[in-house]
Structures are given as C-alpha cells and as structure tokens.
Amino acid sequence: MFDNRDVMISSVTQHRSGRFARAWWLRWPVLVSLAWWLSGANLISAQVRPLAIEGATVLTGTGEVFRQGTVVLQGGKISAVGRKVKRPLLARRVEARRKYVTPGFIDCYTVLTLRGKPRSGVATARAADAFDWYARDEIEAAWRAGITAVYLPAHVPDGTGGLGAVIRLLPHGSPDDVVLAGEAALCSSVAGRGGALARVKTTEALRRGFIAAREYREACEDYEESLKEYEEQLAARSKKAKADAAKKKASGKAKGPNEKKEGEAKAGKKEEELKKPEEPATDRVNEVLLRVLDGELRWRVEAQDPAAISNVLDIAEEFHLALVLEGATGAHLCAERLAALDVPVVLWSQPAGLAYQWKQGEQGCAAPATVLQDAGVAVCFGSGVLPSRGSEPRLALGVARAIGQGFDEVAALGAVTSEAAALLGVEDEIGRLVPGNRADVVIWSRHPFAPGARVERVYIGGREVYRADGDE
Amino acid sequence: MSTSVDERSTVPMAMSEAERRAMQSDRIRRIACVGLIAALMLPAMGWAQAASSPTSAQVVRVVEANAYVTPEGKLRRSGRVVIENGVIVQVGGERPAGTVVDGYEGGVLCPGLIDCHTGLGVLGPLGEHAAAVQPRVRARDAFNRYSWQLRAALEAGITTFGLVPDDENLVGGRVAVCQTASPEGGARALTDGGPLKLSLAPGVFKVDREPTSRSAALGMLREKLEAVHGGSNSSAERDALRAFAEGRLAGWLTAPSGADVLAGVQLADEYGLRLTLIHTHDARLVAGELGDAVEGVVVGPLGMMAERRDAEAAKRFVEAGVPVALAGGLPHQPADSLRIGACVATRAGLPRAAARRAITSEPAKLLGLGKWIGTIEKGYQADLVVFSGDPLDLRSRVLAVYVGGCRVYVAPATATQGDRP
C-alpha cells in the first residue's frame, strides 16, 4: 500500500507543472481509489466490513421479536441485534423492510448430502466423514428451505451405528467452520419392522453392548490396579535384592562360592513368579460406548413403534443415558414416560400417507407433536429420509403443519432454531440471533411459516451463500 | 324417452329388410343419444333431489366468518353466505331476519376442497387389466361409500373428489365424481359420467397384452378414434369412446413424460378432442407448447419434500395460461395433502389466488361440474369449509365442513360455536 501511495505522489508531482496542473487536486481521489483497488485492500475490507440487515421483523429464535429491528454481522459473528441498533461505521446495509429475519434453521435429522452407511456395530464411524462437501445441488436445496446447519446421523437399519455430526452447510469453509461437532451423538436404531422377536434381539444386543463396555472398563481398571501392584512388588523386590546383595557383600567373604550360586538361583526362581499383568487390548468401540455411559455423548435412537420406544427407554433408565429419540412413530403413547425421563424427541416433518396411517392403527396419530408438547416433552424436527435424490427438505412446511395441529407457534420456531441447537449441544454457536453467536442468518419474504414464504438470502458465517432468483 | 317410443309407433309395417336394418341402427343411435343425455342429467336430478331433501329443506342458514375465498381465488373480508335449500343464494350483504346463523370468529370461508385425482375409498384396484381399452369401466363401481378414508378426507376439508381409474390401461374407463358427505349424512357419488381416463404411463405397456410399447399404444388409440369416425365401431357399449372421439366427452390423459404431453396435444389437435393432461415432471419443458390445445392440467400429488421441478410445475403452467388443478393423491398421501401440495406450489412461486383456485374451482371445471360446485357464488351448491385462517396456510385448521348446506363436520374445539338463533 505504501508503495502504491508513493507512486501516486510521484505521479502527482510530475503532472503538477504539466497540462493538468491546475486540476491535480481533482485527480488524486481517482488515483487513491485506483491504488485501493490495485492493492487488494477492498477484498479484505469486504470481509471485514460489517453488514447491517435493517428494517426487518427479527425473530431471534428465543421467542423475542423485534419489529423493524436490525441485525449486525461482523467477523463471521453476530455483533448486535435489536430495535435501536446503530449501524457501525462503513457497514454495508441490507434493506429488509417488511421481511423476516431468523436464525438459520437447523434440521435435526437429515440424510441430505450423506453418502454411504457405516457398517453395523462400528461405533467409531463418523457421519462427518460421509458428508459430501461438493453436493452443491443438495446443499442449495437446504438453503432454499432456510436450513444452514444439519444433524447427520450414522445409522444402520438395526443396532448400533456410528457417530452423528453437526454440520454447517458452508461449502469451501474450513473444517472448523463446517463441522461444529464431529462426534455429536452415538446413533442406534431399533427397527420394529421385523416383529417382536427381532426387536427383542436388537434390544438385547444394545444392552449387551453397554454391559460389555462396563466390563471392559472394569477389566481396564483391574489392569491398572494389578499393574500398580506389580510395580510396587517389583520395586519392593529390587529394594530387597539390593539389600540382600549388600548383605551378601558383607558376609560373602566368609562363605564359599557354591553357596553364593545357590542364593542367586533362589532369587531367580522368585523373580519368575512375579508376572507382569496383561494389558487388555484397546477397544475403540467400547470406549465410545463408555463415553455414552458417562453422559459425555448423547445416545440417539431411531425407533418407529411404541414397543421399541419403551424398550429403549428401559435401557436408558437402566444405564442413566442421555437419550434422544428419532422418528418416534407412536411416541405419543409413551409421552408421559418420555416427559418423566426428560427424553427429547426428533420428529420427521414429512407426514405418512392416509392408507399407511390406518395400517398403523392406534400407533398412528394425527398430531404427535402436539400430544408430546402438551405432555412436556421437548420436540424438534428433522426432514427425515428423503424420498428421492432431488427432494427438498421443506422443514418450515412440516412445522407449519404441526402448528395447524395445535403445536405452540413460538415453540415451533424454537424447535428448528434455539431448541434444536440445544439438543445438538451447539447452542452457543448457532440457533439464536444473539451477539457472539455465529452469523448464520436467513432473510425470508414473509413469516417463515406463512403461505408463499420464500427464502431470499442466506448468510453463513456472515457470508452471503444464497440469493433467490430475481432478488437484486 | 317418449320421443323414441313415438318413433317406434310410427315405423311402417311394410318395409324392406335393408330399410328396416338402417332404421334399426338409426334407432339404436337415437336411443343411445337420448340415453346419454339422460345419463348426463341424472346426476343433476339426483343433486336437485338431494338439495331439496327434508334435512336441509325450508331452512335458511347463514354462515358467517371474517373472510371468504372469491371466485378469483382471492381472500375478501366479511364472509357471509346465505344458504337456502342447499344452494348459495346470497354472498355478502345484509343478514336475513329469523335465520339460523353459524358464526366463526376469525374464520375463512372456502369452497369445499376438491381433490380431482384420488383412489379414495376404493375396493381393490381401480382398473381392469385384461385388455388395454376399457371405455365401459366405471370407477364408481369400485367406490366404497363406507370406507373410513372418506371421513379422514372430509375432516381435512375435502368435500368432493374425482375417483380416477388407474394408469395401467390405455383407456381406463370413466372418472366418477364423489362427495365425502351428503346432506343425508353418508358419502355419495355425484356422477359416474365424468371424463374418460386415458394413460400413457409405463404401466400401460405390458408383456402379456397389447400394447407393449409407447408407439403401439398411440397407434392403438388412433385406430380406435378413427374407427369411431369411420362409423364401423357403433355398438352401444362404445358410447364413451364415441363421445370422446367426437369431442363431446372430456378425456384425462396420464402423461408421465414431456413426450407424452406432446403426443396428447397432437392427438387433441388432430381429432378435436377435449383433453386434460395429468402431468407434473417436465412442466418446465412443455408448458409453453400447450396453448389452447388442452382444457387443463392436473398437477401432483406434491409431497412436502417434492423436487423443485415438480413444485414449480403448477407455476409454469399457470404462467403459460393453462388452467391447473392440483391432485392430492389420496389415500397414498396424508389427508391434508391437497393443501400441502398447494403450499409447496405457492412456495415455488405459484400466485396464491391461483393456488386457491387450483384446489376448488379449477378441479370442479375439469370434472365437468364447474357450474355447480367449487365456488362461493349465488346459485352454487353450498359446499363450504371454514378454516381458522387462509386455506393455503398450513397453520390454519378446519373448523367446520358443509355439504349441500348441511354442516357435516365440526372440529371438536369449536363445537360450542355456531347454531345460535
């Protein structure tokens, strides 16, 4: 920059006596701006420059609403939110009058962009590794639905799968920016489709898994103990041996060489008896299960019938696990137990067909979200399994439908923003429009649940990643 | 019928065999014609009878809400509808004295939703797959009035639906127009003389019968149409095909791909057919090529996760000036799938008024009942749904449903409202 300025000054002095001398002062702003562009400083400033979204109805995700509010994004984070927020110096302004601003929606269960499935029982397989950063079309479909972050499961059809991940849909971002939680939860599923016997088998396998993990821990602890004991004994023995040696040295002169040999042989025999304990092989699967047992990792289980759900609840109760239920067809039948055990539920936003609902009989429920909410269960939403590759995860529609069935409207927005973030353990990063959180923000043409609402712009980390067609 | 009797009495006794045969075939044709007219009028008569049934007769009922859906599909304030003998006699204006008033605070009056393409309440498959051309088959015969599905659809606001023969036959039979409830209580069929169902879906091409390919299917269809025009195919049982070939009866063609749409347009042009297309997927390619060749397009069903190109289909057709009706696809979709489809299409850019029309007045027109149902206007059958807000807003609930002026469903929470003298 300084070099450029020098050039500028010299060029000005050259021309002072020339043809344009009387207008030199007209020229220098042009030259300064030229130098500015050439130096690349404008590119830096575009990223550093704050961005102020003004005039919109701001729904912060926590239930707070600012009419004609302002959201300021700076350095990839939200720096200010409110009604009377002053626009920072040099801030770029985005006029959003009569529009709505929300935190980026969080899809609590989606298979969007997910490639491949983990092998059964590999609790260390990470969904984060299966995320396809380059599935641009699918990521754009999520943006069009206002989704900026997703929970990707690592499920297998039956039994324990891998580790689910929380991913921000930011292509070309650094891994730290994209993978918010590479190991967010351990995924399992209990499929009710194979009948009661299959369900019981799976449940038993899950229980055995946790018991095996406990035994593994005990074995490890035993080893630690016996190792300690062994080392103590070893130390005691070497001390004794030293003392013996000193004794022998003192009395050695008096005794003959045969006697000395005998004594050495005796000591060697004793040394053999003291065996080093065998270290149990490191088992990474059990170590993951132990993290679940310790409550460090959540245990997310997909269960699609109430019998399977109650089996899973039994295990969670037995081992004191932090359980989250997914899919959860028929969960309304055990709503009270879910509330008592404080187990949140992730419902899939896509409703089942009429004929299928009937097949489910009593397990089918017209308004499961409402029943669960009324019982005091925390409910979040996920787009679930998409019917085809080009399917779009219209999360807002599913939530609007739940509201139509009696789900509380304020809680509904929370269920796809702040509550979802809390469920995924990333509430200090995303899901709320509060200063310090990451600048993942969506501008909607209308209220996100209103008919015809459309996503106009999406910012992730303060960067505009999506703009609707025809929006200038 | 009386004309044909008169004709028979005036036939001279002495007649040559050839003359008599010619006369006979002419008579058969006349009888068939009259029969067809009668068949078309029957549902109207049935409807009139239903409207004047004792449960709704002599009762002037006023339904009041905050807004109503206009024939253009817009929302207008102050919804007041006066119903007499099951028919709307007044929209807006003053409340007549001494009437039963059903008031819905904050409600929106919408014409009863019409899902024009369903298999609701059907026993077994909706098609006979032994032969590819089955103009005689009537979807109505597979209709089960007592199916539980009808109640679920009614509670979601659907008052009328098209029972459409499946996609496995080149000519699948006649569409039936049914109602999920009636002033008498139970479900009913309004007419079995609906459009003729045609299909070019992959299911048509089978290995054990003709046609086995798309070109053979189109060839077969042309052959049948030309047979009608050539007069060699005049048996009474081919009436439906004849009426269709002569442009008197509408046909609905399932056209899964854009190429099928173009084939349909070409056929309609060539033979002067009245054709409605059932098509969603390639709308962005073919919407501009339809022009006035077809009566309309049935789009859907659009699930909540529909692909972008499917979601945009309705918008593309409407922009091209083609009337669009949305299909809900019951019973394989949730009961409120018609509204979900409308919401998906609206989010993809379909104007809201067009979306409201696409689930009320447009399907009524395509089913041939555009002058009877699907609109809140004077003279129309009083099929109404009261929503707690905009019908296009999935947050709104169904508060009540009226069919033929009778309240056939009230949502549990609002049971205390209404019926105040």
Image (cartoon, helix red, strand yellow):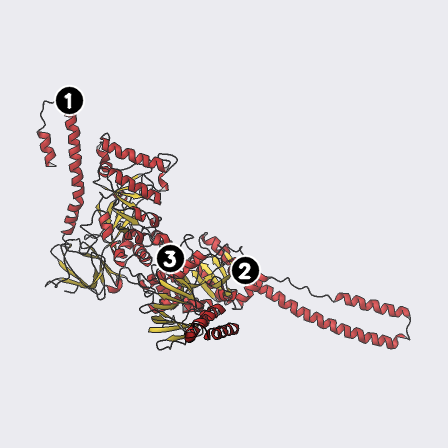
Q: Which residue is mark 3?
A: A350
- Indicate the position of residue B170 as horizontal and vertical percent values: 31, 38
The kind of residue on which mark 1 rests is Glu
- The chain under label 1 reads B
Can residue B72 be seen here? yes
Q: Which residue is mark 1?
A: B17
Label 1 secondary element? helix
Label 2 secondary element? loop
Discs 1 and 2 lie in a common subunit: no
Label 3 secondary element? loop
The kind of residue on which mark 2 rests is Ala
The number of numbered discs placed on residues in the rendered structure image is: 3
The kind of residue on which mark 3 rests is Gln
- Indicate the position of residue A396 as horizontal and vertical percent values: 36, 62
Q: CA distance from mark 1 to mark 3?
A: 70 Å
Q: Which residue is mark 2?
A: A123
Image quarter hosting the C terminus of chain A: bottom left
Viewer-nearest of discs 1 and 2: 1
Q: Residues within 10 Å of mark 2 (few under 14, many from 20)?
A: many
